[in-house]
Image (cartoon, coloured by chain):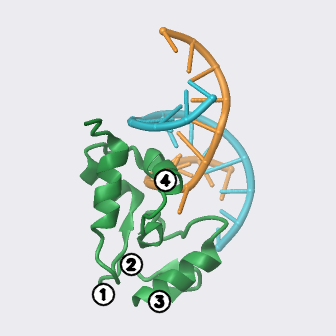
Chain colours: A green, B orange, C cyan
DNA sequence: TATCTGACGATAG
DNA sequence: CCTATCGCCAGAT
């Protein structure tokens, strides 16, 4: 089994509970590759079927080019978005 | 094996 | 607040 970064990221991102949000850095760290936030982003766009909208950047920035789509999806999950940004990691 | 890419992260201006 | 640059890493070609 080619258990690679991709596989790990897929499972982790897919494990993010609805209404919550995580960051690329967090996902990368959980995957076992801290610092590989960039690689995470690539996988998010490479592997379909992933709740990529639950993953944001550490700065609270949403996915570039899909900010509108991203915001709508988060709001649909119950995540409050403020001015194109996510209200913290979905936790108070 | 080498080079390029990118939905990041942090710092500097 | 925004833009630019450097550093980081795995994947794709």
Give the numbered dot on residue A88: 2
Q: Is residue B12 above or below residue A50?
A: above
* Gap in angstroms between the C-alphas marked 1 and 3: 18 Å
What SS does tag 1 mark? loop
Q: Is residue A78 visible?
A: yes
* Gap in angstroms between the C-alphas marked 2 and 4: 19 Å
Label 2 environment density (alpha carbons within 10 Å; few <14, some 14–19, many ≥20): some
* Gap in angstroms between the C-alphas marked 1 and 4: 25 Å
Which residue is pictured at 29% across the width and 35% down the height?
Answer: A2
| Cβ atoms under marks 2 and 1 closer than 8 Å | yes
Which residue is pictured at 52% across the width and 51% down the height?
Answer: A46
Label 4 environment density (alpha carbons within 10 Å; few <14, some 14–19, many ≥20): many
Disc 1 versus disc 4: nearer the observer: 4
Q: Is residue C5 left or right of residue A43?
A: right
Q: Is residue A31 left or right of residue A53?
A: left
Q: Quadrant of residue C3?
A: bottom right
Label located before the other in sequence (4 or 3): 4
Q: Say which of A60 and A55 sits in front.
A: A55
Label located before the other in sequence (1 or 3): 3
């Amino acid at each position: 089994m080619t258990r690679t970064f991709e596989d790990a990221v897929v499972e982790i991102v897919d494990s993010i509970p609805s209404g919550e949000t995580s960051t690329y850095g967090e996902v990368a760290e959980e995957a076992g590759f801290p610092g590989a936030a960039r690689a995470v982003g690539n996988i998010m766009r490479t592997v379909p079927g992933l709740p990529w909208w639950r993953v944001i950047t550490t700065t609270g920035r949403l996915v570039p080019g899909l900010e509108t789509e991203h915001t709508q999806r988060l709001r649909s999950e119950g995540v409050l978005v403020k001015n194109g940004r996510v209200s913290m990691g979905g936790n108070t």
